[in-house]
Amino acid sequence: MVSIGLTTRLTNHQKHILKTLEKLDAPISAQDLHVQMRCIYKKLGLATVYRGLEVLKLHGLVQSRTAINGTSLYTLASKHQHYFTCLQCGNFIDIQACPVCQLEAELEQSLSFKVFYHNLEFFGLCVLCQDSGS
Ligand SMILES: [Zn+2]
Ligand SMILES: [Zn+2]
């Protein structure tokens, strides 16, 4: 997935961000990622983590989505995942199906645009919140 030429241009911090994201099942905020990385890089600043994530995003290696509390959550761009988010409790569940992949391929063709990732999200009330509310 990651070409050798590209990997050598990344800083150690950026490579470590990729490794950490690879091990995680769920999307993570820059803050939480920072806490995890501080175990190894004691003096690492949060700004470095943010900058690293942005660089990796520009390389098409990392994707982000915005949680309902406004926090950006990061995953590897290669992890193709969509979500249903409950507006009341904030719980989210993975959606396996994706109707957009075909469209993405077509856009790459017709616009000569290099697509790294896409976001597709559904919002509403989960089963529990439907029962407790209204
Ligand atoms: Zn809910
Ligand atoms: Zn998709």
Image (cartoon, rainbow, N blue to C red):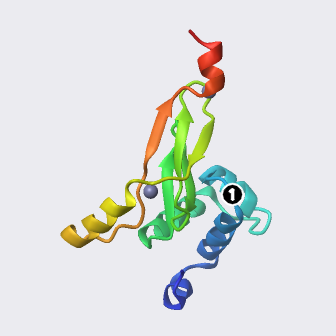
- Where is residue 60 drawn, in percent x and y? 44, 70
On screen, residue 71 above or below 114: above
Q: Amino acid at mark 1?
A: Asp
The quadrant of the image that shows the N terminus is bottom right
Asked if residue 34 is positioned above or below residue 67 in the image, the reply reads below
Residue lying at the far left in this picture: please name it. Answer: 110
Residue projecting furthest to the bottom: 5
Query: Which residue is under mark 1?
Result: 25
- Looking at the image, can residue 69 be seen? no
- In this view, the residue farthest toward the top is 134
Residue at 35%, 67% in the rendered image = 115
Closer-to-camera residue (54/97): 97
Residue 119 image point, x, y percent: 43, 52
Query: Which is nearer the eye, 1 or 106?
Result: 106
Above-or-below relation of 70 to 35: above
| Farthest-out residue, right | 39
Rendered position, 81 above or below 43: above
Residue found 24% across the figure and 72% down from its top:
109
Based on the displayed image, in which of its 4 quarters is residue 59 positioned? bottom left
In which quadrant will I find the C terminus? top right
Q: Is mark 1 within 8 Å of ligand 2?
A: no
The reply to whether residue 45 is in sight is yes
Give how far across and how far down residue 46 sits, in percent. Answer: 62, 56
Residue at image coords 48%, 33%: 123
**Which of 11 and 99 lies nearest the eye of the viewer?**
99
Residue at image position (31%, 60%) is 103
